[in-house]
Amino acid sequence: METDPVAREEEVYSFLSRRLRVVDFALRSFYELSQEEAEQAEQRLSDWFHFFAGQPGWEEVPAKDLEEMLLVVACRYARDSQLEKMEGEPPDTKLGRLVKRAPEEVAHKLAKRLKEEREKVRQEYPEDS
Amino acid sequence: MTEQVTPFPVWRRSLSYEQEAEMAERILETPVAERVEKAGQLRLEDSRVLLGVVHVLMKRWETSPAAVRDEAEFFYRFVEKPKRRIGFFDERDYLLGEFALIAGTMCRGLSRRDEARFWFDRSESRFQHVMGHETHLARLSYQRMALLIEEQEFEAVLEQLPKVTESFTQLNMPKEAMRCRFLEAVTLKEIERLQDAVKVFLEIAREAQELGSERLVAGAYANLLQLYAMLGEREKALAAANEAVPILERLGSRIGVAKIQWGAACLLREEGQLAAAIEAYRAAQREFAELKMRADVAAIHLVVADLLLDVGQQRQAEWEILTALPIIEEYKLVPEGMQALALLRDSVKRREIDRKALRELHGYFQERVAA
C-alpha cells in the first residue's frame, strides 16, 4: 500500500498532541517566550511540521522519528525571536547565554533528555509501555 | 515535561489533506496566464497548497511528463521571483528544490539531458538549506544516477550506487533503497548480464510486494518481460506481463503500459513474428509520441527499420531512419555513437543501409530507465 495521506495526517496530529508540553516547555521555560508568543510559535510550528511530514521522502517516516527535527525548529524559532528583541546582542544572562548556543545543540540535549525519561518510565512501568 | 495527550486545535492542520488536494487541482485547472492574477483566490502562496501541487504533479508524471515539466517550471518561477513569503521557516527553499527536482526528472524522461542537469543543480542549491536535507539530496542523487544510466555511464553508476543505497538505508527509506536496486538491475541489463538482472528484478518484485509498493512491483515485472523476451523465455515473459499490466492500468501509468507494449514487441521479434512485432512496436511508439517521449519514438523507428529490412521493405526502412535521425541529433542522444550515426546517415543517402551501424545505434537505446 502506498502512503495514505489521511492516515498520515491523523498520525501527525496525534504525535503533535503528545508533544505539545515538550515544545511549550522549550519555548517558555528555556527561551522565556511569553504565553502569547509561545501560542503563535506553536501555530507556526504545527503548520510547518504538517508540511514537513508530508514531503516526499519524509512522508513514510514515522512521525515519532521526526521529534528532534520539530525541537530544532522550535528552538531555532524561539532563539531568533529573542535575538531580534536583543537587537542581535545577547546580554550575559541565562537567556543570553542560551541564545548564543546553537539551537540544534539545545534541541539535541532536550531530545536526549526526553528519551532517557521515557526509558525510565518504561523500566518502572513495563506493562504500560 | 514528558508527553501527555493534549488535544489542542492548533496542532490540527489548518487545511485538511482533502482541501489541500482540492485546491491543488483547482490551481492546475486554471490556465497559466490567469494564475498570477488570481494568486490570492487560489492560495498560490500557501505552502500547504503548493505541497498539494507537488503531490498532484508526482501522480501525473507517468501520464503526462511534458505537461508536468512545464507546470514544475511555472511553480518554480512563481515561488522564485519576486521573493515571496511562503511559510515561515524553510518552506520556500524546499518548494524551489522540489519543483526543480520534478522539472529535472521530467526532462530526464523526455531525454532533455542538459536541461535535466541544469534543474538538478538548481534543486541541489535549494535543498541544501532545508531541514532534513540529507533525504532530499539522496533523492536527487537517485535521479542523477538514473540520468547516468541513460548516458550509458554504467561504470560510474555501479561505482556510485552503493553509496546512494546506503544513504537511503540509513535514512530509514526502504522503498528508495529498493529503487536503487532497480537502477542496479537496469544497469546489469544494459551491460548484458541478463541472468543477473533477472535475479535482481525478481528479488525487487518480491520485496516490493512485502513493502506494499505497487509501482515498484509493476516496474520490476515490466523489465522482466523484456528480459525474458531477450532470453527467449516466452512463458515467463507472458507471466511477467500478466503481473504488470493490471497494476499499471490501475495506477494509470501510460509510460509503463507503453513499455509493456515495447516488451511484447521484443518477444514477438525474438519469436520471428516480424509483422506482429512491427505492429506492437508501432503501438508503443504511438503512446510514446503522445507522451512526447521523443527519444523512445526515435529508438523504435530504428528498431522497426531493422525489422523492415528483414522483411524486404528497404524504402520504408529508409523512411524510418530518416525520421529518427533529426530527433537523435536534436537531443544529442548518442554522443558515444556519433560514428555509427554518421555511417548510417551516409548509407541511407547512398540507399544502401548499413545494418551494422543501424544495430549499433539502436543498441544504445536498448531500454530506458523505468523506475
Image (cartoon, coloured by chain):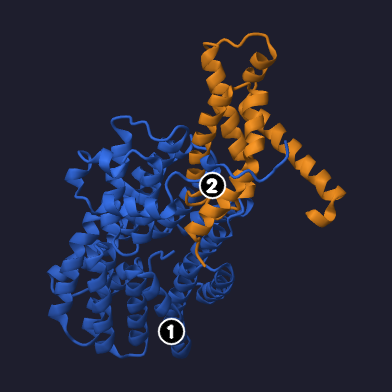
Chain colours: A orange, B blue
**Residue B240 vertical placement versus A14 (above, below):** below
Q: How many marks?
A: 2
**Amino acid at dot 2:** Thr
Q: Quadrant of residue B219?
A: bottom left
Estimate the spatial distance between the alpha carbons at disc 1 and disc 2, rounded to whole Å: 35 Å
**What numbered label is drawn on residue B135?**
2
The reply, left or right, for residue B283 in relation to residue A14 is left
In the image, B270 versus A86, the foreground residue is A86
Q: Quadrant of residue B349?
A: bottom left
| Residue B133 in sight here | no
Circle 1 crowding by C-alpha within 10 Å: few under 14, some 14–19, many from 20: some
Q: What x and y, as percent, mark residue A122? A: 81, 49
Q: Residue at x 40, y 36 (%)?
A: B92
Q: Which residue is mark 1?
A: B242
Q: What x and y, as percent, mark residue A110? A: 70, 33
**Residue B215 vertical placement versus B42 (above, below):** below
- Tag 1 secondary structure: helix
The reply, left or right, for residue B174 in relation to residue B326 is right
Indicate the chain on which mark 1 is placed: B
